[in-house]
Amino acid sequence: MSRGVLRTLAVLSVLELATLAVLLVNLATVHLRPITQAMGPIHGAVYLCVVVIVLFAPGLRVWERMLGCLPVFGGVLALWRARARTTEAP
């Protein structure tokens, strides 16, 4: 798996978690509708980007692809497994 794909997946995974955190903090505190209206679609788009990267990236195993499709932590888990596998290889 190339470094560029791993880096892209890492950035998108962090963005997915960050947008979810903003949505949950907004829900738990002030619940401002404009924040929800702005961050909801952004979070959904980032999640879809993670899924597309995981499904079409070369070199990922089936298990890593399935992990990547899980909401919230899927991208992080797929990245973790892919990085662990690439560091194990001689």
Image: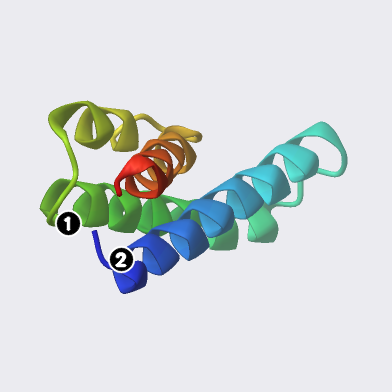
Residue at 79% of width from left, 41% of height from top? 25
* CA distance separating discs 1 and 2: 7 Å
Rendering colour mode: rainbow
Which structural element holds mark 2?
A: helix
**In the rendered view, does 73 fall on the left or right side of 17?**
left
Residue at 26% of width from left, 47% of height from top? 51
Residue 35 percent across, percent down from the top left: 67, 58
Residue 3 percent across, percent down from the top left: 35, 69
In the image, 65 versus 84, the foreground residue is 84
Question: Mark 1–mark 2 contact, CB under 8 Å?
Answer: yes
Q: Amino acid at mark 2?
A: Val
Tally of marks:
2
| 32 lies above or below 74 | below
Q: Residue furthest right?
A: 29
Which structural element holds mark 1?
A: loop
- Quick one: quadrant of the N terminus? bottom left
Which residue is denoted by mark 1 in the rendering?
57
**In the rendered view, does 78 fall on the left or right side of 73?**
left
Q: Which mark is residue 5?
A: 2
Q: Quadrant of residue 62?
A: top left
Residue at 39% of width from left, 67% of height from top? 8
Q: Amino acid at mark 1?
A: Ala
Task: Tell which circle, 1 or 2, labels the residue nearer the N-terminal end.
Answer: 2
